[in-house]
Image (spheres, rainbow, N blue to C red):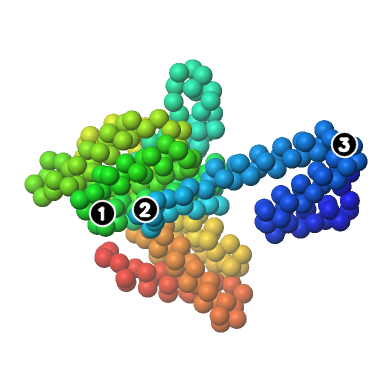
Amino acid sequence: MATAEQIKALIRSHLDEDDDRFHTLALQVAAHEARKGNNSLAQDIKGLVQKAKHQKSDHIVQFPDELNGLMISETTTERISQLVVSEDHKERVERIAHEYRQRGTLQSHGMEHRRKILLSGPPGTGKTLTARALAGELGLPLRTIQMDRLTMKFMGESAAKLRQIFEIIADSEGVFLFDEFDAIGGDRGRDNDVGEMRRVLNSFLQFIEADRSDNLLVAATNNIQLLDRALFRRFDDVLHYKLPDEEERKRLIENLLGSFAGPKFSFSKAAGYAEKLSHAEIDQACLDAIKSSILNGKKSVSGELLTKFIRERRASLPID
């Protein structure tokens, strides 16, 4: 068996999230076991290390230089349980994750899991968080494609860059988020539409129709009314997001403040003051209140303090 020092070193490298060190130590343990004649155990350890390295490399994609900054890859830690939405809405998101996990079973019956998802709603209502939660829940990298940058930076060659993106989708795994999707998804019949955008949209429709990967493709838009109707039948699910209602605002503030809420804090009053604010705006107001309390030596956030920052957020927005 491995020595006590080897075991401690393995544990330390795991806690430090030093994968390279962990793999090196594991191979040293394998060599130690091989010298003792435990060849079967040594081979098992080597096999596990190689499998771990292979799984890690699957998440690494070398983007072409011209796509740097256009497609961003990251590991997320969010979970579906963190979404503050209606139970029906959360159930639909959980269904997407469940079908992904059981995609092999569905494929054995000649069916596909839902993997082309359109998210619509006002800014800050949870669209990006949903994509992050799906990636975190499924242990997949989140790869975000900045669609507005695609059209601005690569005018005249956007369709070609889009082809490169779908080639990456075919060759790697992940949750692919097409952010600011209305940048290319505008109605093809609009008078002010330009030929370039028509070509990009037509290319996207062809690429998404032809895609046969197992990946989740998520498109997010703030203006679903601007989207071409031909897009909708290409998606397996369309989820509409809205500003949080009173109960959702209350739950959101409870989650965000946590132990920072004072003993007499009224979540109902705070939720009332936060009417017409988005999830992201309430998040920022709570964060500002917590930081203010910390910097002023306070152990908790009062209702008056949070109300102050909620008012600041409301004053900066075009709402009544």
Dot 2 surroundings within 10 Å: few (below 14), some, or many (20 or more)? some
Q: Secondary structure at mark 1?
A: loop
Closest to the observer, 280 or 69: 69
At label 3, which amino acid type do we have? Asn
At label 1, which amino acid type do we have? Phe
Q: CA distance from mark 1 to mark 3?
A: 58 Å
Dot 1 surroundings within 10 Å: few (below 14), some, or many (20 or more)? some
Residue 95 makes an appearance in the image: no
Find residue 301 and report its horizontal and vertical position in percent: 54, 72
Of badges 1 and 3, the one in the foreground is 3
At label 2, which amino acid type do we have? Leu
Find residue 79 and report its horizontal and vertical position in percent: 54, 48
Relative to 239, residue 279 above or below? below
Q: Quadrant of residue 18?
A: bottom right
Closest to the observer, 216 or 210: 210
Dot 3 surroundings within 10 Å: few (below 14), some, or many (20 or more)? some
Find residue 26 and report its horizontal and vertical position in percent: 76, 47
* Label 2 vs 1, first from the N-terminus: 2
Disc 1 + disc 3, Cβ < 8 Å: no
Q: CA distance from mark 2 to mark 1?
A: 10 Å
Find residue 303 and report its horizontal and vertical position in percent: 50, 70
Furthest-front residue in this view:
35
Placement of the N terminus among the 4 image quadrants: top right
Which residue in the structure is indicated by mark 2? 67
Which residue in the structure is indicated by mark 1? 154
Which residue in the structure is indicated by mark 3? 38
Furthest-left residue in this view:
191
- Residue 108, label in figure: none
